[in-house]
Image (spheres, rainbow, N blue to C red):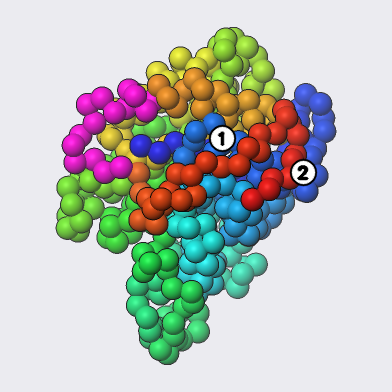
Amino acid sequence: MQFGIFSIGEVAPDPLSGRTPTEYERIKAMTTLAVRAEEAGLDVFAVGEHHNPPYVCSAPPTLLAHVAARTRRLLLSTATTLVTTNDPVRVAEEFALLQHLADGRVDLMTGRGDTPDVYPWFGQDLRRGHELARENYALLHRLWREEQVDWRGRSRARLDGFTSTPRPLDGVPPFVWHAALRSPETAERAAYYGDGFFADNLHGPVEHHARLVDLYRTRYSEHGHGTAEQAVVGIGGQVFVRPRSQDAVREFRPYFDRSPAYGGRYSLEECAARTPLVVGSPDEAVEKILGFREAYGDYQRQLFAVDHGGLPLKTALEQVDLLGERIVPVLRRELSVGRAPAAPPGPRHPATRRPGPAGGGQAPSVRAAEGELVPVSS
């Protein structure tokens, strides 16, 4: 079981101080969070892709390469890469290069995104979203597995005997997750290829995403990749914890109420009751997250958002520390009990199991002071 954090990189004002960080500060803060995640004993750092304000991470491979140089064992992923508007050739080459730089510590999470305007910005038609996702991923899948590719499609220029470079590290492509908010087509695509399925369930009811996971598991087995228990599932969530529950609710409420994703739609209490959002004490967080196994079965990766809604870096770092100290160790222990023998571990490239830095060597001591943006030596 892998645990980690992810960021969508939005620039939002702090509702308490009224201060909005600069883009520079926000980008540096994401790097600081990634480094702290490794120090705290977490497994994964992931970052989303957006091309519109108020978001700052338009080029995840660039940010992840920067993080790779400053960490030693942390797995790096996107959350997500826009499979509809990115050229599959560029995706294949950029992530294969990143995979080499990071000694195999790279995943890719594909998705269609939630910003309709991005389609015309990149010369695509929103009405072809599902078709683009299908066609582009089919090409990406081949580019990583075939030395020479001939391609004819509607989404890009033809390819004749094309070889993407560099080739995947040791001939093993990055592991791919297909992320969905609501799309059965995405669950089907993940199952068809035998890839992972990530239930991107930040704002929806748990039971809705459980149905998508069940569909994926069933189709994974029907496509002949293994049993339903052997399917690879990831889950999203959000946490805000303090040693005392009432302090967590009091401190988080203004951020929740002013969040573009939540504000005015429903109360904090309603959201916490229906969605994966956890606001409370570490013990309450553990109890709720353990309940996810009842909905999704034994799964492989759990990611948490910790820096959303204008939360200052100091507070986000405290959340990472609480995850590493009070929550994740308990989850690892409890989720190992009764785990199905057929359930696979979280995905890793074979290179990460070698002796040396990527295989578990110690990261340099880079712990920042609370809220401080510190350059890190590699």
Q: Nearer the viewer, residue 72 or 252?
A: 72
- Circle 2 packing at 10 Å, graded few (<14), some (14-19), many (20+), is few
Could you tell whether 334 is left or right of 365 in the image?
Answer: left
Q: Residue at x 23, y 46 (%)?
A: 230
Which residue in the rendered view is the most extreme toward the front?
Answer: 355
Give the alpha-carbon distance from disc 2 to disc 1, as whole Å: 21 Å
What label does residue 25 carry, if any?
Answer: 2
Part of the protein shown in magenta: 331-345
- The secondary structure that most of the magenta stretch takes on is loop
Expressed as whole percent of the image width and height from the top left, the position of residue 273 reads 46, 21
- Name the residue type under label 1: Glu
Expressed as whole percent of the image width and height from the top left, the position of residue 226 reads 18, 52
Dot 1 falls on a residue whose secondary structure is helix
Expressed as whole percent of the image width and height from the top left, the position of residue 128 reads 47, 67
- Name the residue type under label 2: Glu
Nearer to us: label 2 or label 1? 1
Q: Nearer the viewer, residue 72 or 174?
A: 72
Q: Residue at x 55, y 23 (%)?
A: 322
Say if 236 sits above or below 292 in the image: below
Return the residue at label 1.
Answer: 39
Q: Dividing the image into 4 quarters, which one contains the N terminus?
A: top left
Q: Residue at x 35, y 56 (%)?
A: 350
- The answer, for residue 202, to whether it is visible in the render is no
- Marks 2,1: beta carbons within 8 A: no
